Image (spheres, rainbow, N blue to C red):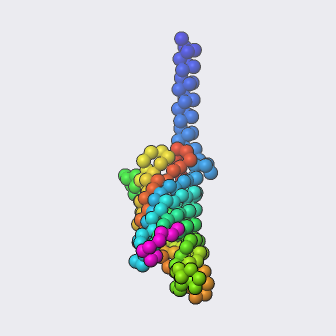
């Protein structure tokens, strides 16, 4: 009987020790990986809203998340034809935590490249008598603030408001700018149960 009690006590001790080590283990590289899935909208003053999906992949630290995002949207410069806009964006989110609440405030800044298909340009084609088009490559800039709300150990909801600007300059005489207030709603997914990030 005494031997059985000793064995049971040893098992309880080992289980408690394993749980304690799990709770205090150091975060691994995989623990820091994040995926973003979102829908986003830019509301320019000179054209209809740019609406589309986005996907991001990145790395989390205690105070900053670094995300590489790709976004696609449809826009309309002249209210007649929908055209495609693609963005590649490197975004840094500074995280602010508050005691006694799961909410995390985000302050983000992003830079990147953009690609627009079938952009309008001044003039008319002499053969087809149709407006001239071009494919534009340019840059993207974004400032935003938002919140991150954990739903469980691996998924958090995100929402952010900001300002986004994209410009295209295919030649020295032509330039197109699309910019205005932006809205983004999505989820941020961790690769495993979240561990407290110590740096």
The one of 82 and 152 positioned closer to us in this rendering: 82
The location of residue 157, given as percent across then percent down, is: 43, 53
Residue at 50% x, 46% y: name it. Answer: 154
Direction left: furthest residue: 100
Per the rendered image, the range of residues in magenta is 77-84
Direction top: furthest residue: 1
In the rendered image, residue 81 lying in the magenta stretch gets the answer yes
Residue at 51% x, 50% y: name it. Answer: 189
The one of 159 and 88 positioned closer to us in this rendering: 88
In the rendered image, residue 44 lying in the magenta stretch gets the answer no
Q: Is residue 155 visible?
A: yes
Position of the N terminus by quadrant: top right
Residue at 58% x, 58% y: name it. Answer: 58
The one of 93 and 40 positioned closer to us in this rendering: 40
> Would you say 51 lies left or right of 88 here?
left
The location of residue 192, given as percent across then percent down, is: 55, 45
Count all numbered tags in the image, as a single digit.
0
Residue at 53% x, 80% y: name it. Answer: 130
The location of residue 103, given as percent across then percent down, is: 40, 55
Prevalent SS, magenta region? loop
Q: Is residue 181 above or below residue 175?
A: above
> Would you say 128 lies left or right of 98 here?
right
Position of the C terminus by quadrant: bottom right
Q: Is residue 92 visible?
A: no
The location of residue 9, given as percent across then percent down, is: 53, 23
Direction bottom: furthest residue: 173
């Amino acid at each position: 009987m005494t031997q059985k009690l000793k064995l049971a006590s040893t098992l309880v001790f080992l289980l408690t020790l394993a749980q304690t080590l799990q709770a205090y283990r150091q975060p691994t590289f995989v623990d820091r990986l994040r995926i973003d899935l979102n829908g986003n909208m830019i509301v320019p003053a000179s054209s209809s809203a740019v609406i589309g999906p986005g996907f991001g992949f990145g790395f989390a630290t205690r105070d900053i998340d670094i995300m590489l995002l790709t976004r696609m949207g449809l826009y309309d410069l002249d209210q007649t034809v929908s055209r495609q806009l693609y963005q590649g964006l490197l975004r840094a989110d500074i995280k602010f935590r508050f005691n006694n609440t799961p909410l995390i405030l985000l302050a983000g800044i992003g830079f990147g490249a953009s690609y627009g298909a079938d952009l309008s340009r001044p003039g008319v084609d002499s053969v087809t008598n149709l407006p001239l088009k071009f494919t534009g490559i340019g840059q993207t800039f974004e400032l935003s603030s938002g919140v991150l709300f954990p739903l469980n150990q691996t998924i958090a909801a995100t929402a952010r408001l900001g300002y986004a600007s994209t410009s295209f300059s295919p030649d020295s005489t032509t330039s197109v700018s699309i910019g205005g207030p932006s809205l983004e709603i999505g989820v941020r997914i961790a690769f495993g149960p979240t561990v407290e990030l110590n740096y």
